[in-house]
Image (spheres, rainbow, N blue to C red):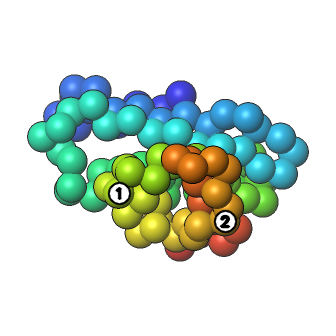
Amino acid sequence: MFGLFIDDVLRGTSRLHDISSESAYIGIALFDRSIWGQGWATRMIRKIVRFAIGSLGLKKVLAGIEKENIASQGAFNKAGFRPNQLLSHDLKVVVSPSPRL
C-alpha cells in the first residue's frame, strides 16, 4: 500500500493486488474531496505503474472501474490506460500495456 501525503497529511492511498508474475491490479482511493479534480489520482497511478513495471518487472497493470465512476475513468485514461473488457454490467477493466509515464 502506498500513501498520498500532501502537507504531511494522508489524503489518499493506492495498492497493487492480485499480483502475478506478469500483471497486477491497481486500486486507488482519494478520500480528501478537496483535492479531487487536481490531477493527484493520475499522478498516483503513473507512479505506481512505474514502480510495478520498473521495480517488479510486471508487463501490465489493470484496474477494475465502476462504469458510473467517470472521474476515475478519466484519471486512468490520462495515465495511459485503455478499455479492455466489460466484466459485468457495472464494472469494466482498463489495461495499460505500455503506460505514458
The x, y position of residue 73, in whole percent, is: 42, 59
Badge 2 crowding class, 10 Å Cα cut-off, few under 14, some 14 to 19, many 20 or more, is few
Q: Which amino acid does label 2 sit on?
A: Asn
Q: Taking 25 as reference, is 74 above or below it?
A: below
User: Regarding mark 1 in the picture, which secondary structure is present there?
Assistant: helix
Please give the count of numbered marks on the rendered protein: 2
C-alpha separation, residue under disc 2 versus residue under disc 1: 16 Å
Q: Can residue 52 be seen in this view?
A: no
Q: Taking 89 as reference, is 31 above or below it?
A: above
- Identify residue for label 1: 70
Left or right position of 59 against 47:
right
Residue nearer the viewer, 43 or 78: 78
- Identify residue for label 2: 84
Residue found 55% across the figure and 34% down from its top:
15
User: Regarding mark 2 in the picture, which secondary structure is present there?
Assistant: strand
Left or right position of 73 against 48:
left
Residue nearer the viewer, 24 or 10: 24
The x, y position of residue 28, in whole percent, is: 45, 39
The x, y position of residue 1, in whole percent, is: 53, 28
Residue nearer the viewer, 12 or 64: 64
Residue found 30% across the figure and 51% down from its top:
40
Q: Which amino acid does label 1 sit on?
A: Ile
Res. 25 image quadrant: top right
Farthest left residue?
A: 34
Precedes in sequence: disc 2 or disc 1: 1
The x, y position of residue 34, in whole percent, is: 12, 40
Res. 4 image quadrant: top left
Farthest right residue?
A: 21
Badge 1 crowding class, 10 Å Cα cut-off, few under 14, some 14 to 19, many 20 or more, is few
Residue found 38% across the figure and 51% down from its top:
68
Residue found 37% across the figure and 50% down from its top:
69
